[in-house]
Image: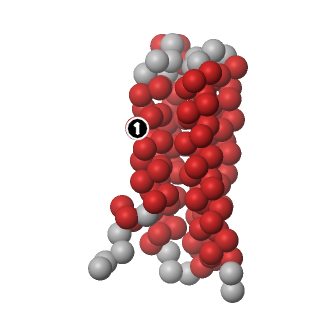
Amino acid sequence: MKKEVENLIIYKQLLEMTYYTENICEKYPKNEKLAIVTSIKNTTYDCIKNVIYAFKMYDKSLKLNYLNKLDVDLKFLKVLVRLSYRRKYINKRNYTAWSKKITNVGNLLGGWISSCAKV
């Protein structure tokens, strides 16, 4: 069976998080559509792109480079979600659900990084 990125659990979780992100971002006020919403969406898309790049890399150091970029993107996304909650663009339920999705992806990423770091 050929390995495909679509079969990765982290990829599936990221897609689910992306769909959720798209739905939530529609609720933001119009004046934030070109500011924080753009940053949130671009960071989410960068996450998916980094997973695909990491999956395609055979060199472990290059793979780890993309996984570390993904880690940075996830941490930045958490900051943006927290900012959204503090500015009351999203409610507590949305904040909790979104944070859980980001944390789940982060946990999967931690496992992937650990498996790549082993010699």
Q: Can you say which quadrant of the picture contains the N terminus?
A: bottom left
Type of colouring: secondary structure
Front residue of 61/87: it is 87
Residue at 61% from the left image edge and 37% from the top image edge: 99
| Residue at the outermost left position | 1
Front residue of 111/84: it is 111
Would you say residue 73 is visible in this rendering?
A: no
Residue at 36% from the left image edge and 75% from the top image edge: 3
How many residues crowd mark 1 within 10 Å: few (<14), some (14–19), many (20+)? few
Spot occupied by residue 107 in the image (x, y as percentages of width and height): 63, 56
Residue type highlighted by circle 1: Tyr
Q: Is residue 113 above or below residue 22?
A: below
Spot occupied by residue 22 in the image (x, y as percentages of width and height): 42, 32
Q: Could you tell me how many numbered marks the image carries? A: 1
Would you say residue 104 is visible in this rendering?
A: yes
SS state under label 1? helix
Residue at 51% from the left image edge and 23% from the top image edge: 34
Q: Can you say which quadrant of the picture contains the C terminus?
A: bottom right
Q: Is residue 31 above or below residue 115?
A: above
Spot occupied by residue 60 in the image (x, y as percentages of width and height): 60, 79
Q: Is residue 67 left or right of residue 16?
A: right
**Residue under numbered circle 1:** 19
